[in-house]
Amino acid sequence: MYPPSDDTLLLLGSLQVAEEEEILEMGCGSGIVSVHCAAAGAKVTAVDVNADAVRCTMENAKMNNLEVKSILSDLFSCVSGTYDQMVFNPPYLPANEKDPLALAWSGGKGGVEVLDKFLRHAPDFLKPEGHVTIVVSSRMDCDLLRTSMLRYETKSMARKRLFFEELEVLSLSVR
């Protein structure tokens, strides 16, 4: 499970959450983003491929007296419904690690493979005026990333330079 780090904090600082908004957090990890959104009054569904992450998210929501629906799912495989906003801090390091422990950080070919799969299916689960909020890294293959986002209008929400990469939070709307 991926622990909250600089990318998580950048995402949290740039999220815009409305009360009663229906939010899907993909790759919920510890649940910090889902709990943040639920505390702002959103109706949150948290998804992760890791059963420990799903349990951790449920426990963190419970400890904060918040309601978060948590689902074990490989991306959208067990997800239903439509959402106002989807939030995803994907695994983005360029590596083809197949070790289950690497799922939290290995983004596959060019660091974009997991995000590409997500973006191909996200429109099917978005409400008409919905949008997607994601984290991307300068370590990702920029050409592959651009190709993955062709069907979206993109708006930069925040950036942070670290000593080895630059992180950016993007808001995407289907064209």
Image (cartoon, rainbow, N blue to C red):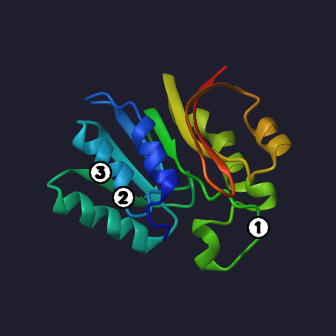
Residue behind mark 2:
31
Residue type beneath disc 1: Ala
Where residue 41 sits in the image (x, y, percent)? 23, 36
Residue 33 vertical placement versus 172 (above, below): below
Q: Which mark is residue 132?
A: none
> Is disc 1 in contact with disc 3, using a CB cutoff of under 8 Å?
no
Question: Quick one: quadrant of the C terminus?
Answer: top right
Please rate how many residues cluster around mark 2, counting C-alpha atoms within 10 Å: few if below 14, some from 14 to 19, many from 20. Answer: many
Residue 172: which quarter of the image?
A: top right
Residue 144 vertical placement versus 110 (above, below): above
Residue type beneath disc 2: Gly
Residue at the image point whose x is 77% and y is 69% from the top? 96
How far is the residue under mark 1 from the one under mark 3? 29 Å
Name the secondary structure under disc 3. helix
Residue behind mark 3:
35
Please rate how many residues cluster around mark 3, counting C-alpha atoms within 10 Å: few if below 14, some from 14 to 19, many from 20. Answer: many
> Is disc 2 in contact with disc 3, using a CB cutoff of under 8 Å?
yes
Name the secondary structure under disc 1. loop
Residue at the image point whose x is 35% and y is 55% from the top? 32
Marks counted in the figure total 3
How far is the residue under mark 1 from the one under mark 2? 24 Å
Please rate how many residues cluster around mark 1, counting C-alpha atoms within 10 Å: few if below 14, some from 14 to 19, many from 20. Answer: some
Residue behind mark 1:
95
Asked whether, in this view, residue 92 is left or right of residue 66, the answer is: right
User: Quick one: label 1 or label 3, which is nearer the N terminus?
Assistant: 3
Where residue 65 sits in the image (x, y, percent)? 14, 54
